[in-house]
Image: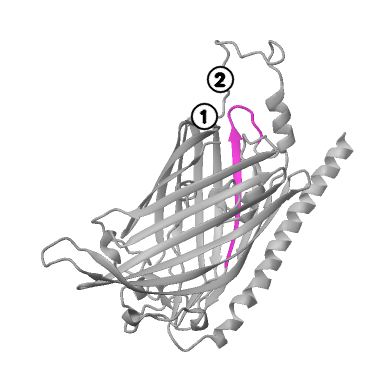
Amino acid sequence: MCVRQSRRAGALSLLARAILAASVLLFFLVLPAGCPARAQESAGTTVDVFRGPVISSSRVLGLGGAYTAVAEGTQGGLLNTASLANRYAWSSDWFDWDFNLDWLILVPGTDADIDNDGLYAGEGDGYLGINLGAGLQFGRLGVGLWLNSDTFAAESGDNRLTYAFTYGYLGAAFAFLQEQLVVGAGVGGGGLEVISWIDQAAEGKRADWKQTGTVKWNGGGLESGVLWRPLKLPIRLGTSIRFPILIDSSKRDKIDQDLASAPLPDSVRIPWRIATGVSFYHSFGGHPYNQRREDKAVRAAEPTPQGEGAAQPADSPPLNRRYILAAFDLVFCGPAPPGAVGASPFAGGRRAESGRTGSLSVHAGLESEVWSNRLVIRGGSYLEPPRLEETEMRPHGTVGLDLRLFRLFYWDLRAGMSFDLAPRYYNWGLGVGFWH
């Protein structure tokens, strides 16, 4: 027995080292991918599509963005593609599915320094973020899709321009080594859509905006992720990589006449991103953090003490699902091409240089199911890196919750809420999805 445990511990130690080595190797593989293009960029204006604030699902935002090593369900798809095949704690069926839809809104009437440049965009009503995810799980295989969209509005008199930056992909993941190692990859892309509007309302009346023109840019990209979840240990390690996406003028639609004089970039750049994280878990009911789906299915099928199929007595204690989860992430985004400008300043007609150097951010979060099978609360913090010239690192504090609502057909629905507070920035989100 001791020899067998020693071999298992040695194998897990070797696996952890292999994941660490793979993370380092991937870092140096992706680094050149972000740098050679610097000499090939167009001389025109390049928009650096970088988001310092966490723009994600209510759970991820509530945890301060620390989700790379939690990686559960469709809420974590844009942070680690391995989440597609990583089961929730209570998912035991061979087939399962998940979805989430979240809205991130700046409170009307509040100022919002989106790019941490000391300037305000939209005055609270010019920004909207949407996150959508859907996934299917078949045994150890998972497939799904994600979509993230950020929209800025800039107004000048009777004219209005809307800049919509979108990123999404299709992905798949598979769990190896008794579901201890999960590997995922996705293919997708990003784009920019600029829409022009004109106010047709009579003087003194409420604005009546009519669309007059539109133009789009589109480009493809890749993502990959790895999650190590050792059985019987309350810890996970995760690493993910998003490769850079460059969308130049050759991938732009024909410009409508109404947009001929609008401020349009020559190209759009989504920087490469590497994230690595660790998470720890403690269950007050004795439920393991990392389990095989088959083991959970066996436990779910075990008869009660009164016999096969008998109902639990009324005085028996309910299932104790309460737990506490801690997660930590380090995220590094690569530099932008020389002379690139920030997305939010560009939408407002400014030319603030962005991404001259890479950006490192630190994320941490805590989560607990304080009311078993009913309510989860979470809190977190992260340091937003200075992406623009002459800016400083900005601390954020986040809180969030998930509440189980009611059963609809075969599924329990949940509602999520999250808040993100920082100097010159206040954001809140609402989400819906399945309760697991």
234 magenta-colored:
no
Q: Position of residue 248 (x, y in %)?
A: 51, 81
> Which of the marked residues, 2 or 1, is nearer the chain's N terminus?
2
Residue segment shown in magenta: 273-288
The number of discs equals 2
Q: Which mark is residue 318?
A: 2
What percent of the width, then of the height, locates residue 305? Answer: 69, 13
Q: Position of residue 382 (x, y in %)?
A: 46, 55
Residue at (57% x, 70% y) in the render? 272
Q: Pointer 1: residues within 10 angstroms few (<14), some, or many (20+)? A: some
Q: Amino acid at mark 2?
A: Pro
In the rendered image, residue 276 lying in the magenta stretch gets the answer yes
Quadrant in which the C terminus appears: top right
- Which residue was labeled with disc 1? 373
| Numbered label attached to residue 225 | none
Asked if labels 1 and 2 touch by Cβ distance under 8 angstroms, the answer is: yes
Residue ID at (48%, 30%): 374
Is residue 264 or residue 21 the one in the foreground? Answer: 264
Q: Is residue 225 shown left or right of residue 12?
A: left
- Assign the N terminus to one quadrant of the image: top right
